[in-house]
Every structure is written in structure tokens, then in C-alpha cells.
Amino acid sequence: MDQSLSAQSKRNLWRAVVKYKHFYVLILPAVICFIVVNYIPMAGIVIAFKKYNVFKGIFGSPWRGLHYFERMWNSPDIVNIIRNTLIISFAKLAVMMPASILFAVLLNELGVLFLKKTFQTISYLPHFISWVVAAGLVRALLALEGPVNVLVRIFGADPVMFLGVPAYFVPILVLSTFWKEIGWGSIIYLAAISGIDPQLYEAAEIDGANRWHRMMHITIPSIMPVIVIVLLLRVGRIFDAGFDQIYNLYNPLVYSVGDILDTYIFRLGIEGLQFSYTAAIGITRNLVGLALLLTANYMTKRLTQDQSGI
Amino acid sequence: MKCFFTYAVVIAVTIILFGGTGIGNVVAEDKLSISFLGVNSKGTLLEKDSIVELYLEEKFGVDLEPWYDVDSNDQQQVNIKIASGEVPDVFRTGKNPGTFVDMGAVREVPKELIYQYMPTVIKKCEELAPDTLWDMTTIEGKNWGIPYAISIAKASPLMYIRKDWMEKVGVTKKPDTLQELEDLFLKFRNEDPNGNGEKDEYAYVGMYVNTHENLAAAEFFPNIFGTFGVNVNPGEFVVDAGTLRRDTTSKNYKEALKFLAGWYEKGIIHPEFMINTRKEVEELLANGKAGVYEDWSAWAERDGIGPFQAMQKNNPDVTLEYVISPAGPDGTRGVYQRDSAWGTVLFGAEVSDEKMIKVMQMFEVMYTDEDVYSMINLGRKGTDWDFDEKGNVMTLNNSQDPANRAKSGIVHFVYHFIYPPIDKYYVPAWRFPAHNYALQNQVQLPIAYSPPFNAEDSAVMGDIARYEAEFAYNAIAGKIDIEKEWGDYVAQWNKTGGEKLLATAQEMYTAR
């Protein structure tokens, strides 16, 4: 019985493939590209278990077992580095997610189309500035002779060397990310909002709902699936705390709070040619990221009774 | 008809894709082809068939294949290419080739061949760095490269002080002790030498580097640490009667940090010195916010780039005073001494003996024959350079401009084998005053030992250097109580790998 069923479903699948063959042909290049670019290189992670030799190549190099993983866990810095990465990343997530949603909702509430477009464009602009330049701006703003310290002086306080104080460093990272990415981060929510059926708003208005009610009971619930997806994607990349930004802003006075996995990997891998070691760190980082993503997805599904999640 | 077009397109594409590998690239069979990673001039890529390349090919009967598409200054790009198995036949690296040896990227270079095929060159290098030259290339008893040395390294870093500021605050005597320096710097701080009516000057601008990830000796108060007898340069171990130590855990170092913390507190050192990038430091000097920096003679009064140039641009009246190895509190003097042993030339792992010997023979001519050396380093005599009436080398027609160098190949094929008499073609005339001043007046600390660590130990050394930098900056900036934190610092230094590394270095030193 079972066998015939599965045979039948196989037949059906094949029939569907034949029927829609043109679509399959169309998607083929993308699938091939995906396999070639994303899956085949994954075989390279074996260098984490090998002592990499240039001429013997990835597969010919001698095995080292778990040596590099052991070295990672024995490294005195690693705990601090992981802690910094998570703190910075969660701080950004905690501020940026709600802020982007709020910004999108507020933009949506703006009646005047011209103003809406203007604000949107202005808020997108910083996203296109590279962190090398943006960090220069932040440094200039926060320098002892910079505008922020001019304000500090006007209020009678002593100037502060902002970038040299560990307590300020994470807030500076979060705020500068806020300035740079708020507009860009809100795009996906704006798109989701524009997909909401206007009839819902009209019906609510007839029933006497004011703006606040409409926002809370129509806009936010309607974009909730998008919010959840974005949150899941962000959680999966929680170890990505923003290399470019930090690398261009940090200094010895704030290493204790600013050194993250990516700066560590950069230092050892790209500058120090420690490919096997940094591959081991990379693998660990990605496995933990994957585990977090799966957990978050599972939790979401449990909480929303399978309505959300991937 | 349709079919015909399909075939036509396929054939055309095939020709376009694979045509390049065919007839056009045939090289005369008898010429040895040598791939070569040269020295790129700031932000430029070497152009094909430059006059220097053609000159060398003609002179030595070889086919040179420089890496046209790689900027040798972009170490990351070079590293990644090498790590992916694309190793040039000939390239150079700094003091320690251990990482490349570890990766299997380079071949062994028998010492006898070097002595046999480039005897003059290697003798000159040995004269400059008699004790340390071969340390660079010897790993576990084998030799992995051609070590090279430079004579200009003999001059230690100088302290450059705004002479016009000294005149403004009424100091005529050149300071010669830490106390005199302090008195002068306090005047800089308090007597408004930039004349804008505000107390916005600091004396010392601190470092002159882009990153602050280690305490590079040249930029990190070499003349101050020197008076305390301390060498902070990363990767170097001081030899004391056969026993190695790292000075950054010594009592003298602690005292030096306390001294600098005192200067920082008095406003002598610019408060942001540990944050500033090279460009920001230059701006501070140019804008008259600071009047003192320390660096090699190469950055003294350089034409074109550097702090002095930036200062002069804003104010043509800027003049500099040189100070080197001032006397400390108990009268001792010292300044960091760098080793003349400078780096190594490496050969890709698959280079044949024949090719390696050919390169050695070429080097023997390139770095001893003044005509050849001046051609590859300066270009054509009379067109690109000439002697002035004093016998100094003068460059002509903007030949040293990076864009022109990229076109002509000048400098690109020159590695740093620099010693008399060919160094007169290397050191430009503007550099002599500072350079000679340093040579005549410096009191140097002894040369320290740089162990050729493998990749893993080098990484640990990097971690330690970073940890040292973190402590030193926090100490000088008054963020921590040096005396109270010292014990923890040394313990953590050992834990970070310092203890193990010191033992490894000691083993290497004893075994050499």
C-alpha cells in the first residue's frame, strides 16, 4: 500500500517536472550557481583539521585533527572576544530592529508624499558611505576639538575623549549604526506595510479606530511575519558584529570591549596567514550561529503555533 | 541557416576564450622565465615593457615576469595569492620567513650557493650585520632565503622639534636631557607658540603610525624609552649575557611608563596620541597643535610626503631641530637601535636550482655594479637623474613620481640590498643632514634578537604585542595605576603566551 503510494507520488512529481520543464530550465542556472558558489567551497572547511600547505593544496595537506580547535579554546582572549561580539551584536539588534520598524511605521503615517520620499532618501544616504569614510566622520565628530566636545564645553563640562572610554564605545557603535542604517533597515518593513490591504484601514476607520489603534492593530500585526523573518535572519548572523565599523574605530584603550571575532580572524587569518586556525574559529562561529537560528525558529513556531518562522 | 549561425557563434566564442593561450604568447625557448614580485610605488601597478624591465631582460638574457596585477604594498592581497598556491619565483619578505616556510610556499636555499654565486653582495651584508644576518633565514638548521641588509638602518630614530617654536618661547639651547626637554615642552604647552591666543598646543604628538596594535619602536617614544635602557619593539628579545628577556616586563620599563604618564598628565603629550591615525597626527602637526614627533631620518625633511611637508605647507617658516638619545635622570643615554639585517629574498617552492642560481648571479651584478644599480633604482643618467656639483644624486623630470615610476619600472626591481658605495644612489640628498646627525650623535642600545618564529608562535607574539600596547597606552593615559596593576600585567603577559614564547626564543638563540 505504502509502496504504491510513494510510487504514485514519484510519478506525480515526475509528471509535474515534465509539465513545468521550462520553469525548471529557467531555475537551473541559479541552482548551479548556488551549488558552485555556496556548496562546493564548503569542502574547503577541512583545512580546519589540516596543516595547510600551499602546494599540497587543501586536500593533500597533512591532518592535524582537532589541534586548531583546542588552540582556540586554550586561547586566553577567546572568551572575552566572544563576549564582546555578542554584546555588540545584541545591542545593535535590540536598538536597530525596533527603531527600523518604528521608523517605517512613522514614515507610513506621514501624509505628505513629498516629505515621506524626502525623509526616506535622506535616511538611506548614509548607508552608501563606506565605513572607512563614515568612521572618519565619527572620529572627527567625537575628537577633543570636535563639535560634540564644543557642546560639552558650552555646558561647562570638561571635554571627553569619547573613543578612548570603554563605557562609551559600544553606545558609539550602536549610535553610529543607527545613523547609518536606520533608513536602509526600514525598507523591508515599508515594503511589507505597502502590501497591507487598504480595506482593513477603511473598515477600521468606519468602526471608529484612530491612528494609534490602526497602527497597533493593523499595521504591526500585518507585518509581524516579516519582522519575525528579519529577526531570525539577524539571529543567525549574531556573530557578525560589524567588522568594518569596529576596525576603523577601535584603539588600545577600548580593545577590552571592542575586539570581536571578526577582527581576531582578520588579524590572524589575513594578516598572519593562519588559515587553518581561523577556519576552525569560522566553523565554530557558524555552527553556533546555525544552532541559534534553529532555536529561534523553533521558539517562534512554538509561540505562534506554526504561523511564523521558516 | 539557424544551425549555421549557432555553429558560427560557438566557434567565435571559443576563439575569443582560448585564443589568448595560443600563438601570441610564445616565448623564446632558450630564455629562462622568472616570475617576480617587485616593489610597487605608492598605489600604482607596474606597466608592461617598462625601460627597466627591458634593460634587465636584455642585460641578463632572461624573461622577467613581474606580477603586473598585484600591488606589493597590499600585503593581504599578496598573502592570499601565495596561500592559494600562486607563488612567485622570487619575492621578498621581512625578517621572518617562518610563515611561508610553514605553509610550504618556499624552497630551501643552500648557503654555499649564495657564497658561490653572490660573494660580494653577501659579504657586504655580513659586514653590516655580522651577528644577526643569518638568524633571519635559518630555521631548524636550514637556510630558507637570501638575507639582505641595509646601511641606512644604522641611524636611530630622531626626535624632531619645531625650532621656530623654540625661538618663540625664548629657548636657544638645544635640549640634551629629559629635564631640559620637559622644561621646553612645558613652555610649548603654556606660552602659546602657535600664537593664536589659545592654550591649544601640546608638545608631543606621540606616535606616527596607522594602527596601534603594537609598540613599534620608531614611533613609540624611542628616545625616552632609550634613556631607561628599554627596547619595546615587538618581536625583539634583549640578550643579557646569553639569556633572553623581553624588556616590556622589566622594572625599567615600568619606570619609563610612569615617567611618560607624568608627561601625559602635565599636558606635554597630546591626549589623543593613542587614538590618532597617521593622517590625524600630520594634521595636528600641520595645524600647530603639536610641535614634536619622533621618527627615522627617512621622515625628517622629506620632499613630497610626510609630517614636515604637511607642516611646511601650512607655514613655510617651519624649521626643525634634531635631538637624539638625551640623558636620563641618572645621566644614562640610549635610543632604540634597529638591526641592519633587514629582510629576506625567498624562492617559490617549485623553483629549480638553475633558476635560483641565475637570480643569484643577477643579484651579484645588480647590487654591486653602480651603473646597473643606478639604472634600476633611479633610471637613465642624464634623463631621470644626474649628479649635482657636490656629487649628490639629483632626480630629474619628476622621475620619482609614483606614476612615472610605474611607467618606467624605476625602483620596482630593487630589493633592499643597500650598502656603500651603492647606497649613495638610494639615500636622497635631503636625507643626509638628519641621517648624519643621528649617526654622529646617537648613543644606541644594543641590537636585540629577533627569533624566526613559526606561524603559530608569530601569532602568539602578535597577541602579546597587542596586550603590551593595551597596557602601555592605558598606563600612559593614566587610566590605570601602574604600580598596582603591574603584577597582574606581568602574570597576564606570561599567561598570554609570553612565558612559553620566551622559552622558545631562548632555545632558538642557544641553538643557533
Image (cartoon, coloured by chain):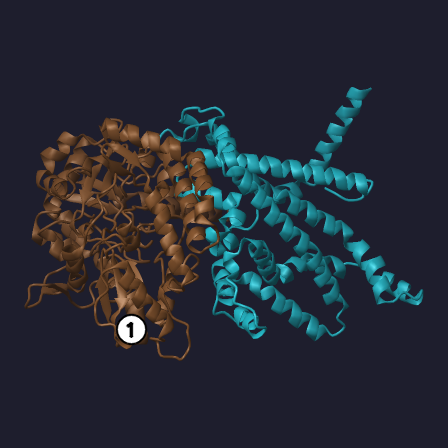
Q: Colour of chain A?
A: cyan
Nearest the camera: A5 or B344?
A: B344
Q: Is residue B394 above or below residue A32?
A: below
As drawn, A255 above or below A288: below
Q: Nearer the viewer, residue A190 or A238?
A: A238
Q: Determine the chain carrying the residue at label 1.
A: B
Q: Position of residue B121 (x, y in %)?
A: 11, 42
Q: Is residue B8 visible?
A: no
Task: Pick the residue in front: A295 or B413.
Answer: A295
Residue B499 at x, y percent in the picture = 39, 32
Q: Position of residue B98 (x, y in %)?
A: 31, 35
Name the image quarter holding the C terminus of chain B. Answer: top left
Q: Residue at x 27, y 27 (%)?
A: B140
Q: Quadrant of residue A217?
A: bottom right
Neighbours of disc 1 within 10 Å: few (<14), some (14-19), many (20+): many
Chain with colour brown in the figure: B
Residue name at image x 29 percent, y 73 percent? B165
Along the viewing direction, whichever of A271 and B264 lies nearer the viewer: B264
Question: What is the secondary structure assignment of the residue under circle 1?
Answer: helix
**Residue B401 in view here:** yes
Q: Position of residue B146 (x, y in %)?
A: 20, 38
Can you identify the residue that label 1 sits on?
B165
Q: Is residue A136 left or right of residue B89?
A: right
